[in-house]
Amino acid sequence: MAMSPENEHPVKAFGWAARDTSGHLSPFKFSRRATGENDVTFKVLYCGICHSDLHSIKNEWGITSYPIVPGHEIVGVITEIGTKVTKFKVGDKVGVGCMVGSCRSCANCKDDLENYCPKMILSYGAKYNDGTTTYGGYSDIMVSDEHFIIKIPDNLPLDGSAPLLCAGITVYSPLKYYGLNKAGMHLGIVGLGGLGHMAVKFAKAMGLKVTVISTSPNKKKEAMDHLGADAFLVSHNTEDMALAMGTMDGIIDTVSAVHALLPLFNLLKINGKLVMVGAPEKPLELLAFPLLMGRKMVGGSCIGGIQETQEMIDFAAKHNIVADIELIPMDYVNTAMERLSKADIKYRFVIDITNSLKPF
């Protein structure tokens, strides 16, 4: 395939979907729209498994419509482009992250912040402009408006770069926005999972001093020897936490479980920033007094705009940053979800779509 003549005939596709709150995934046939004049169609080669996928297939956020084909860390090779596509060509290595649409006209979109557009369209489980349901990357092909396509540099392996499209941009964007990307700064990273290990890699590439903060003492060797962190704190070791008080310029908190914030505030310097990128299901206790006494800030961040995502991918290529992955076949996905629920992964599952998703 090459240039699309634009037609209205949908394209047959297949993947794996969850059909109810059990979250069990099984083969599923569906249709993608034909390649429109501004669209890019690509063969999916790999798709990362994000913790959001697990929440979504089980409807733990209460917003899932079934059937749902998950996956928003999607990479592959272009097979067809629309007649008005200018930025890509057939054969390019590309990816799609968490979104496939936005209004393109609001203040946020005009500031390249499509991720904060009120009409942002998620890559799966949402309604597209034409009223159809969006299906994610646990599938054989993907169609997207070229605006939401990310070019993957040739020196990045596709399997290891897939998680950058969610986990990577989720930590890269707040490091930049909150000014925590200046060489020599001291950054704390709470949690050493899919997000946390990416945060360590990006922060080190930016020249920061990095301290990993974890509940698990057995992660110290991995954090320091393998990922290159400069220090490691066990969050329930009150003596070590006390010694680190007032030493950090900022903290990126990647933890999605309920946890105490007060010990983290104490680690910050005056004017320090605690940035939340994890999403606990229940409210966290936020005490005002520790913020007042140190003019400290609590902020949040959610993925990044398309321009910034491309910038992140290019930065990753320059510094040879990829995720640490476990490559799995499609039929292992339910076992992978069980393991993910127990945090039994270092650090991201990636589905080998091209070699294991079979037509049925």
Image: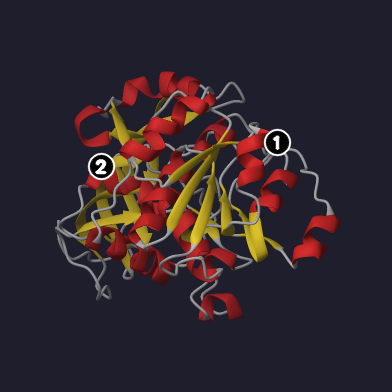
Q: Is residue 64 visible?
A: no
Image point (34%, 45%), residue name: 228
On-image quarter of the N terminus: bottom left
Q: Amino acid at mark 2?
A: Asp
Image point (62%, 25%), residue name: 21
Residue 9, above or below 327: below
Distance in Å between CA atoms under marks 1 and 2? 31 Å
Neighbor class of circle 2 (other Cα within 10 Å; few <14, some 14-19, many 20+) is many
Q: Amino acid at mark 1?
A: Val
Q: Is residue 43 visible?
A: yes
- The numbered disc on residue 159 is 2
Name the side, left or right, on which 94 lies relative to 129: left
Return the residue nearer the eye: 241 or 126: 241
The image quadrant that residue 146 belongs to is bottom left
Instruction: Find numbered disc 2 in the image and state the secondary structure of the residue it sits on.
Output: helix
On-image quarter of the C terminus: top left
Give percent across and percent down for residue 353. 27, 35
Disc 1 versus disc 2: nearer the observer: 1
Disc 1: which residue: 258
The image quadrant that residue 92 belongs to is bottom left
Return the residue nearer the eye: 34 or 161: 161
The image quadrant that residue 80 belongs to is bottom left
Return the residue nearer the eye: 34 or 238: 238
- The numbered disc on residue 129 is none
Give percent across and percent down for residue 12. 32, 42
